Image (spheres, rainbow, N blue to C red):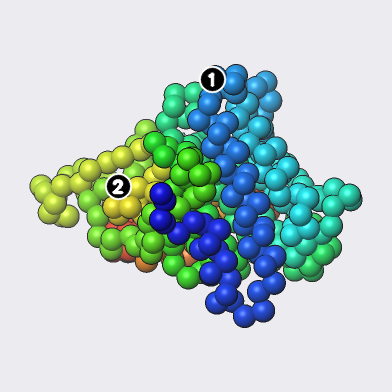
């Protein structure tokens, strides 16, 4: 007999604290959760239903699309386009804004998402995830244009991720802290298992793709070199390193036990300000990290304060345990 609080109950109880709430947002979130359950089922079946492997196509990022990239994008669209809560959607897998079909009503929110982050890991059975961010439409009930999505991250109403790992978890914030839910497949519900997630202020664990070391800027070079010097160097203590190549898994580890995650600007491709995308990776994860007591910066500015220039803008990301991120920011200031 399960006795935990279900996500549905949690959202409705949260709604009661929001003056003037109409239930629109609660219903939208419920549709997002249904899409996530559908994606979890497809990801967990994997090769059994022939969804592994790559397609011949590339996305707007110039990255080869996996079958599951396209399938999960379709799932997010189909489960969220019909109910009349959204004025438009945008995704890593679509060049342009997705307009709500004429046969459906328009709503007062916008949703932007990465349907399967870390999808290069899906064929090797390493955790992947879905990242989503919900904004208010500047003009409710009117078809959204790209410019409507270009809002600073502080304007997010909600941010969340699903992690398809040894268990499927959903972690989300609506600006009142961060809560984690685990999918109980026996009842088909997410159950509250990690209330009030907080990132420890200190850490000895850093995450970065060290193969890019020769391309990093000086402050990141210095920080990582000192971590590697450990107890023999200026930090006076040894560090540990992790790199999963799946941002959702890295952020979840940091929420659970602390850490610092860096995908800094590098000179490998001077045309790119970083690898990660602002609207559907950096902003939602930054909202969650800050709500859990951490920091998230480009090295030079708070990510949530940035006004996006386009849907697929890339930014450098340094996020995690507050005191460790502060060390890196200090090196950028100097
Ligand atoms: P690299 C996945 O493709 C992703 O966008 C993030 O989830 C992950 O942190 C990063 O890129 C991995 O990048 O260069 O190590 O493959």
Location of residue 231 in the rendering, given as x and y in whole percent from the top left corner: 11, 49
Q: Which residue, given by chain and number where applicable, does mark 1 sit on? A: 47
Q: Which residue sits at x=37%, y=56%?
A: 194
Q: Nearer the viewer, residue 322 or 78?
A: 78
Q: Nearer the viewer, residue 289 or 161?
A: 161
Location of residue 284 in the rendering, given as x and y in whole percent from the top left corner: 53, 56
Q: Which residue sits at x=66%, y=29%?
A: 58
| Nearest-to-viewer mark from 2 and 1 | 1
Work out whether 21 lies above or below 201.
below
Q: Which mark is residue 206?
A: 2
Determine if residue 119 is in view.
Answer: yes
The local crowd at label 2, few if under 14, some if 14 to 19, many if 20 or more residues have their Cα within 10 Å, is many
SS of the residue under disc 1: helix
In the displayed structure image, the side of residue 196 where residue 235 appears, left or right: left
Outermost residue toward the left? 232
First in sequence: mark 2 or mark 1? 1
Whether disc 1's CB lies below 8 Å from ligand 1 is answered: no
Location of residue 234 in the rendering, given as x and y in whole percent from the top left corner: 15, 54
Q: Which mark is residue 269?
A: none
SS of the residue under disc 2: strand
Determine if residue 308 is in view.
Answer: no
Q: Which residue sits at x=79%, y=68%?
A: 139
Outermost residue toward the front? 1
Q: Nearer the viewer, residue 41 or 144?
A: 41
For residue 318, which quarter of the picture?
A: bottom left
Quadrant of the image containing the C terminus: bottom left
Q: Which residue sits at x=41%, y=39%?
A: 167
Work out whether 325 lies above or below 48.
below
């Amino acid at each position: 007999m399960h006795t935990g609080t279900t996500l549905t109950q949690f959202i409705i109880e949260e709604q009661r604290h929001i003056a003037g709430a109409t239930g629109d947002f609660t219903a939208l979130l419920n549709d997002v959760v249904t899409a996530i359950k559908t994606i979890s089922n497809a990801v967990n079946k994997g090769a059994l239903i022939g969804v592994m492997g790559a397609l011949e196509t590339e996305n707007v990022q110039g990255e080869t699309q996996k079958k599951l990239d396209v399938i999960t994008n379709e799932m997010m669209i189909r489960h969220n386009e019909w109910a009349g809560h959204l004025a438009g959607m945008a995704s890593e897998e679509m060049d342009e804004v997705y307009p709500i079909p004429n046969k459906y009503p328009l709503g007062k929110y916008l949703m932007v998402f990465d349907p399967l982050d870390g999808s290069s890991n899906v064929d090797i059975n390493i955790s992947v995830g879905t990242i989503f961010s919900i904004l208010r439409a500047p003009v409710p009930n009117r078809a959204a244009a790209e410019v409507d999505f270009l809002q600073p991250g502080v304007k997010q109403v909600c941010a969340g991720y699903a992690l398809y790992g040894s268990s499927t978890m959903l972690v989300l914030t609506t600006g009142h802290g961060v809560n984690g839910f685990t999918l109980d497949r026996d009842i088909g519900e997410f159950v509250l298992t990690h209330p009030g997630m907080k990132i420890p202020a200190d850490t000895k664990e850093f995450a970065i793709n060290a193969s890019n070391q020769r391309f990093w800027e000086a402050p990141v070079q210095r920080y990582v070199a000192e971590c590697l010097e450990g107890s023999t160097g200026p930090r006076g203590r040894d560090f540990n390193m992790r790199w999963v190549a799946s941002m959702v898994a890295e952020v979840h580890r940091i929420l659970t036990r602390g850490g610092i995650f860096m995908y800094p600007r590098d000179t490998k491709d001077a045309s790119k300000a970083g690898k990660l995308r602002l609207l559907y990776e950096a902003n939602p994860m930054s909202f969650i990290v800050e709500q859990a007591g951490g920091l998230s910066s480009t090295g030079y500015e708070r990510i949530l304060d940035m006004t996006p220039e386009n849907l697929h803008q890339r930014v450098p990301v340094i996020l995690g345990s507050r005191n460790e991120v502060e060390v890196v920011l200090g090196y950028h200031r100097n």
